[in-house]
Amino acid sequence: MEKKNIDWENLGFTYLPTDKRYVSNYKDGKWDAGALIDDPNIVMNECAGVLQYAQTVFEGMKAYTTADGRIVTFRPDLNASRMVDSAKRLEMPVFPEERFVDAVVQTIKANAAYVPPYGSGATLYVRPYMFGINPVIGVKPADEYQFRVFTTPVGPYFKGGVKPITICVSDFDRAAPHGTGHIKAGLNYAMSLHAIVTAHANGFDENMYLDSATRTKVEETGGANFLFVTKDNKVVTPHSSTILPSITRRSLMYVAEHYLGLEVEERDVYFDEVKDFAECGLCGTAAVISPVGKVVNHGEEICFPSGMEKMGPTIQKLYDTLTGIQMGNIEAPEGWLKVIE
């Protein structure tokens, strides 16, 4: 398929509408058949449940052009499963996992001309989401819902190369024990906006959130999980019931163990031990891994030995291996790549 006439090399990480999006509606206790449509706009009542009580969940994923010219997406079955968990927690109807994957495939295929060419550094971002759409004035779940998938081509997260970032320990809490930190709900991201704007205003790139119960353990940032590398080259990631189970993090831990032969560990990570790690990274869909060079805790600086100029050696290997798998240069574990065409 002929690609759209887009300056792929200079794309930003911003919304650019594509030709088609998928829509399915839930009414009278069941989902309709769903369809691809042209209109990117949504019409809803002023009292829609999503507008009044933030009843919405979403996922984020990407489609790539591989080295051999295929269009693929990465582990969509895990996104489908995570959305089921998110929907259940917010008392929303489950969109069946097999239909989720099919809707993602249909939407990517319908917008194949927007999947950036191999080697451009750009990708097609895919956003499945669901929200309560009927009028709700009392505090209760909506009765009707809409599930949608849209796509938008985005540029590489790192413009001009990867540089380690500086993050601060946030004074704000991201999630409460027994709250919604483990699901991908819009409300979690809304409450993080003030914290990230505050961090940026103070000259930092991101926040490090500690657990809200004791404020002694590392949790995550507003939109990414942490990976640490010990001085003896063990890969460690925090464990917590209030951390979003990142698909990228799970994939990186598998790569560390099964491709690079490293010891891996998911456990409580106390802030007091952060100073003892050799490397630190933030992992998520957008950047895969963002290297962290420095953590600042109210004036106290923790500088990782990997420095502020480039990724540390182990995080670089993790990044190169996972992106190599996603782009088809390294053989993927079975089921990791869903071929679109």
Image (cartoon, helix red, strand yellow):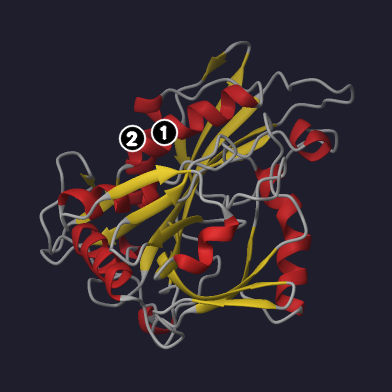
Across and down, in percent, residue 122 comes to: 36, 72
Q: Amino acid at mark 1?
A: Ala
Residue pictured at 42% horizontal, 88% vertical: 309
Q: Which mark is residue 332?
A: none
Q: Determine the image quadrant of residue 69.
A: bottom left
Across and down, in percent, residue 121 comes to: 32, 75
Please name the residue that numbered disc 1 is placed on: 80
Q: Secondary structure at mark 1?
A: helix
- Say which quadrant the N terminus sits in: bottom left
| 102 sits left or right of 56 in the view | left
Please name the residue that numbered disc 2 is placed on: 77
Q: Nearer the viewer, residue 78 or 174?
A: 174
| 336 sits left or right of 41 in the view | left
Q: Is residue 124 above or below residue 139?
A: below
Residue pictured at 72% horizontal, 40% vertical: 213
Q: Is residue 212 above or below residue 94?
A: below
Q: Are marks 1 and 2 in contact (CB under 8 Å)?
A: yes
Q: Is residue 9 above or below residue 281?
A: below
Q: Amino acid at mark 2?
A: Asp
Q: Determine the image quadrant of residue 158.
A: bottom left
Residue pictured at 59% horizontal, 57% vertical: 271
Across and down, in percent, residue 288 comes to: 38, 62
Toward the top, the furthest residue is: 29
Mark 1 and mark 2: span between their CA atoms?
Answer: 5 Å
Across and down, in percent, residue 335 comes to: 19, 39
Q: Secondary structure at mark 2?
A: helix
